[in-house]
Amino acid sequence: MKQPVVLGIETSCDETAAALLIEGRIVADCTTTQLLHKEYGGVVPELASRAHERLLMSAVQEVLDEAKITVKDIGAVAVTRGPGLAGALLVGMSFAKGLVTARQIPFIGVNHLEGHLWGAEITHGKLPLPFLGMIISGGHTMTVGVNGLGRYEKLGETHDDAAGELLDKVGRMMGYGFPAGESLDRDAMSCQPTPRHYDTTTPALRFPRARIKGDPLGFSFSGLKTAVLYYLREKYERRAIGYMIPDAERIGISTAIMEAVSDMLINGLATAWETDDYRALVVSGGVASSRYLRIRLEQFAAENDIPLLIPPPRHCTDNGAMIAYTGYLRLQAGFTSKLDLSIDPSASLW
Ligand code: KG4
Ligand code: ZN
């Protein structure tokens, strides 16, 4: 039987994204990152909603043009229902409801976190079950045991900041602008870490790695944030754009931050890996596009004989393809949503 063309829509934060899936394959994928938040040093919810409203139609038109189809060919619409910013989610949700109502086609509300997990199948094909999933983004840092679609076991979560949030906050102090993760990662990479870099060289600077008493699977990044702040405050002059750090020292500091973040994430992963007979490790979310972290993860996986699956960077950060694909999986499994489905800004996986 011919499968419906699925349109995926993602508007949970500051990426306005749409993608089309035909016969199980992503054929067009458009992500627009809203740059207007840069000058505010963080995502401004009201401005994000307005920008989604302005950008979404052209993102959808772009994927239709790329796939050389028209709106009449769309057979189902998948949209992020949460977690995310309420106003931002409402834009995508209302757009999707309008389209499915007009076209009388199936409608699928998708959990954004589920999208990050299953989106790995776009590149890596069917994921072996059970797998250990790790989502590391601006809003989340968690490990989850995945036994199937909708069958998730809670393992570890951050007790305070998410890893991306930490990078954005310390990056801002260091004058990187917003979001800071990618620039900080680029500087950390400019000292050319090899897979053995972190233990053959003695870093001049070492920030603390937090472990949480009574929760070996949990994460905490707020101590690292404070340690970086104290370090900068002690050594450098503060201006409006951040602390004045000479370039060479900035590279050392970024490296020390990425090392500490990588160590904490990998410690949590190593503990989580022992909780079941997982057949693969899937890592996704914006921070998983860090080249520095990817080297460390590859090394950890190789040393422990773990099949490691990470989507390409464009599918680690928020995107419409992961929503179209997860919607398609849900549709195949016989799940569709009713039109009275509402957004869920604090949706969780369990
Ligand atoms: O998954 P995502 O696009 O949005 C959320 O759902 O939060 O993740 C955004 C986060 C931001 O904190 C950003 O600084 C971080 O991912 N990020 C990176 C890189 N690219 C984006 N962090 C480190 N290295 C990168 N290359
Ligand atoms: Zn995300």
Image: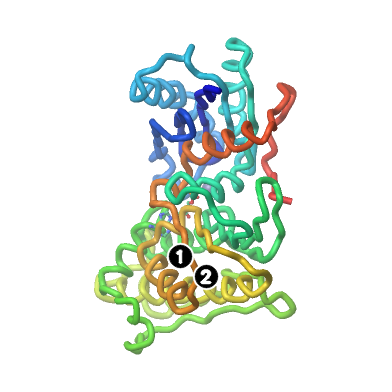
Where is mark 1, residue-wise?
Answer: 170
Identified at 40% across, 36% down, the residue is 31
Instruction: Tell me which label, 1 or 2, sits earlier in the chain.
Output: 1
Pointer 2 local density, CA inside 10 Å: few below 14, some 14–19, many at least 20? many
Q: Is residue 88 visible?
A: no
Identified at 65% across, 63% down, the residue is 157
* Image location (x, y in percent) of residue 86: 64, 36
Q: Amino acid at mark 1?
A: Val
Place residue 234 in its image quadrant: bottom left
Q: Quadrant of ligand 1?
A: bottom left
Place residue 288 in its image quadrant: bottom left
Q: Is residue 111 visible?
A: yes
Q: Quadrant of the N terminus?
A: top right
Instruction: Examine the rendered structure and indicate whether residue 94 appears above or below residue 314.
Output: above
Question: Which is more toward the observer, 203 or 168?
Answer: 203
Judge left or right: residue 2 versus residue 236.
right
Identified at 68% across, 72% down, the residue is 275
Q: Which mark, residue 261?
A: none
Instruction: Examine the rendered structure and indicate whether residue 33 appears above or below residue 276.
Output: above
* Image location (x, y in percent) of residue 226: 54, 73
* Image location (x, y in percent) of residue 217: 66, 72
Q: Is mark 1 within 8 Å of ligand 1?
A: no
* Image location (x, y in percent) of residue 81: 64, 35
Instruction: Examine the rendered structure and indicate whether residue 303 appears above or below residue 174.
Output: below
Q: What separation in Å lies between label 1 and label 2 (alpha carbons)?
A: 6 Å
Pointer 1 local density, CA inside 10 Å: few below 14, some 14–19, many at least 20? many
Tell whether label 2 touches label 1 (CB within 8 Å).
Answer: yes
Judge left or right: residue 67 versus residue 92.
left
Disc 2 secondary structure class: helix
Q: Amino acid at mark 2?
A: Lys
Q: Which mark, residue 225?
A: 2
